[in-house]
Amino acid sequence: MTRPRYQVVEHTADFAFRVTAADLPDLVQAAILAVVDAGWGIETLRPGGTLTPVDLPVDDAEMTLFRALSEVLFLIDARGLIPAQVTVTRDASGGLSLGLDCDRLDPARHGHRVAFKAVTLHGLNVVAGGEGLVATVLMDT
Protein backbone atom coordinates (compact mmCIF):
# COMPACT_ATOMS: atom_id res chain seq x y z
CA MET A 1 0.00 0.00 0.00
CA THR A 2 1.34 3.42 -0.96
CA ARG A 3 1.83 5.59 2.12
CA PRO A 4 0.46 9.12 1.92
CA ARG A 5 2.98 11.96 1.79
CA TYR A 6 1.48 15.22 2.87
CA GLN A 7 1.95 18.03 5.32
CA VAL A 8 -0.95 19.62 7.21
CA VAL A 9 -0.90 23.39 6.77
CA GLU A 10 -2.14 25.63 9.58
CA HIS A 11 -5.41 27.27 8.59
CA THR A 12 -7.92 29.30 10.58
CA ALA A 13 -10.83 27.16 9.39
CA ASP A 14 -11.35 23.87 7.58
CA PHE A 15 -8.42 21.59 6.68
CA ALA A 16 -5.45 22.49 4.48
CA PHE A 17 -2.58 20.32 3.31
CA ARG A 18 0.40 20.41 0.97
CA VAL A 19 1.77 17.67 -1.28
CA THR A 20 4.91 17.56 -3.42
CA ALA A 21 5.43 15.27 -6.39
CA ALA A 22 7.56 14.85 -9.49
CA ASP A 23 4.70 15.30 -11.99
CA LEU A 24 0.93 15.76 -12.25
CA PRO A 25 -0.04 12.05 -12.08
CA ASP A 26 2.05 11.60 -8.93
CA LEU A 27 0.62 14.83 -7.48
CA VAL A 28 -2.96 13.65 -7.99
CA GLN A 29 -2.13 10.29 -6.39
CA ALA A 30 -0.48 11.99 -3.40
CA ALA A 31 -3.42 14.36 -2.88
CA ILE A 32 -6.01 11.56 -3.01
CA LEU A 33 -4.06 9.49 -0.50
CA ALA A 34 -3.69 12.55 1.76
CA VAL A 35 -7.47 13.10 1.81
CA VAL A 36 -8.15 9.41 2.46
CA ASP A 37 -5.57 9.26 5.25
CA ALA A 38 -6.70 12.48 6.93
CA GLY A 39 -10.36 11.49 6.67
CA TRP A 40 -10.32 7.76 7.41
CA GLY A 41 -6.80 6.53 8.11
CA ILE A 42 -5.07 4.72 5.27
CA GLU A 43 -3.96 1.98 7.67
CA THR A 44 -7.59 0.87 8.18
CA LEU A 45 -8.20 0.18 4.49
CA ARG A 46 -8.05 -3.11 2.60
CA PRO A 47 -7.54 -2.78 -1.15
CA GLY A 48 -9.18 -5.31 -3.40
CA GLY A 49 -12.82 -4.61 -2.71
CA THR A 50 -13.90 -2.62 -5.76
CA LEU A 51 -11.88 -1.28 -8.70
CA THR A 52 -13.25 2.06 -9.86
CA PRO A 53 -11.80 3.61 -13.04
CA VAL A 54 -12.09 7.38 -13.47
CA ASP A 55 -11.02 9.41 -16.52
CA LEU A 56 -10.04 13.05 -16.03
CA PRO A 57 -9.36 15.64 -18.72
CA VAL A 58 -6.36 17.82 -18.02
CA ASP A 59 -7.44 21.47 -18.31
CA ASP A 60 -4.83 22.76 -15.91
CA ALA A 61 -3.22 21.31 -12.82
CA GLU A 62 -5.56 22.98 -10.32
CA MET A 63 -8.78 21.90 -12.06
CA THR A 64 -7.46 18.38 -12.56
CA LEU A 65 -6.67 18.11 -8.86
CA PHE A 66 -10.05 19.63 -7.95
CA ARG A 67 -11.93 17.14 -10.15
CA ALA A 68 -9.97 14.15 -8.85
CA LEU A 69 -10.58 15.02 -5.19
CA SER A 70 -14.25 15.82 -5.86
CA GLU A 71 -14.67 12.40 -7.48
CA VAL A 72 -13.08 10.71 -4.46
CA LEU A 73 -15.41 12.53 -2.04
CA PHE A 74 -18.39 11.52 -4.20
CA LEU A 75 -17.32 7.85 -4.14
CA ILE A 76 -17.00 7.92 -0.37
CA ASP A 77 -20.23 9.82 0.32
CA ALA A 78 -22.54 8.40 -2.35
CA ARG A 79 -21.24 4.87 -2.87
CA GLY A 80 -19.47 4.06 0.39
CA LEU A 81 -16.18 3.33 -1.42
CA ILE A 82 -12.89 4.55 0.04
CA PRO A 83 -9.81 4.44 -2.24
CA ALA A 84 -7.19 2.25 -0.58
CA GLN A 85 -4.76 2.25 -3.50
CA VAL A 86 -4.48 4.78 -6.31
CA THR A 87 -2.78 4.56 -9.68
CA VAL A 88 -2.69 7.53 -12.04
CA THR A 89 -1.51 7.30 -15.65
CA ARG A 90 -1.71 9.51 -18.71
CA ASP A 91 -4.13 8.29 -21.35
CA ALA A 92 -3.80 8.59 -25.15
CA SER A 93 -5.63 11.94 -25.22
CA GLY A 94 -3.28 13.50 -22.65
CA GLY A 95 -5.81 13.24 -19.83
CA LEU A 96 -5.39 11.20 -16.69
CA SER A 97 -6.79 7.79 -15.94
CA LEU A 98 -7.32 7.00 -12.25
CA GLY A 99 -7.45 3.46 -10.97
CA LEU A 100 -9.04 3.50 -7.53
CA ASP A 101 -8.87 0.18 -5.70
CA CYS A 102 -11.53 0.79 -3.06
CA ASP A 103 -12.51 -0.69 0.25
CA ARG A 104 -16.20 -0.69 1.17
CA LEU A 105 -16.94 1.71 4.04
CA ASP A 106 -17.25 -0.24 7.29
CA PRO A 107 -17.90 1.96 10.36
CA ALA A 108 -16.67 -0.86 12.63
CA ARG A 109 -13.25 -0.78 10.95
CA HIS A 110 -12.90 2.76 9.64
CA GLY A 111 -12.55 5.52 12.21
CA HIS A 112 -13.73 8.87 10.87
CA ARG A 113 -11.00 11.43 11.60
CA VAL A 114 -12.09 14.47 9.59
CA ALA A 115 -15.45 14.84 7.81
CA PHE A 116 -14.80 16.52 4.46
CA LYS A 117 -17.71 18.24 2.73
CA ALA A 118 -15.86 19.33 -0.39
CA VAL A 119 -12.59 20.37 -1.92
CA THR A 120 -12.51 24.13 -2.49
CA LEU A 121 -11.07 26.24 -5.28
CA HIS A 122 -10.20 28.89 -2.69
CA GLY A 123 -6.44 28.75 -2.13
CA LEU A 124 -5.98 25.73 -4.40
CA ASN A 125 -2.74 26.16 -6.25
CA VAL A 126 -0.11 24.09 -7.97
CA VAL A 127 3.33 25.57 -8.54
CA ALA A 128 6.59 24.26 -9.91
CA GLY A 129 9.14 23.74 -7.17
CA GLY A 130 12.60 22.31 -6.80
CA GLU A 131 11.26 18.74 -6.53
CA GLY A 132 8.62 19.02 -9.27
CA LEU A 133 5.14 20.26 -8.36
CA VAL A 134 3.81 21.53 -5.04
CA ALA A 135 0.06 21.71 -4.40
CA THR A 136 -1.74 23.42 -1.54
CA VAL A 137 -5.32 22.21 -1.04
CA LEU A 138 -8.06 23.52 1.23
CA MET A 139 -10.86 21.13 2.14
CA ASP A 140 -14.24 22.29 3.47
CA THR A 141 -15.09 20.44 6.69
Image (spheres, rainbow, N blue to C red):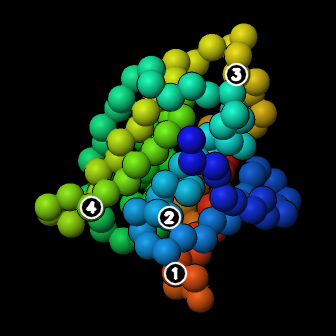
Q: Is mark 3 on a helix, strand or loop?
A: loop
| Quadrant of the image occupied by residue 7 | bottom right
Could you say where residue 83 lies in the image, as x and y percent from the top left? 51, 35
Label 1: which residue?
132
* Numbered mark located on residue 105 in the image: none
Q: Type of residue at label 3?
A: His
Image quadrant holding the N terminus, namely: top right
Question: How far is mark 1 from mark 2, CA to CA?
Answer: 9 Å
Label 4: which residue?
90
Q: Type of residue at label 4?
A: Arg
Q: Type of residue at label 1?
A: Gly
Q: Residues within 10 Å of mark 3 (few under 14, many from 20)?
A: some
N-term-proximal mark, 4 vs 3: 4
- Does the rendering let one see residue 74? no
Label 3: which residue?
110
N-term-proximal mark, 1 vs 2: 2
Could you say where residue 102 lies in the image, as x and y percent from the top left? 47, 29
N-term-proximal mark, 4 vs 2: 2
Question: How far is mark 1 from mark 3, CA to CA?
Answer: 33 Å
Which of these two is toward me, 49 or 81?
Answer: 49
Q: Type of residue at label 2?
A: Leu
Label 2: which residue?
27
N-term-proximal mark, 1 vs 4: 4
Location of residue 51 with respect to 1 vertically, above or below? above
Question: How far is mark 4 from mark 3, CA to CA?
Answer: 31 Å
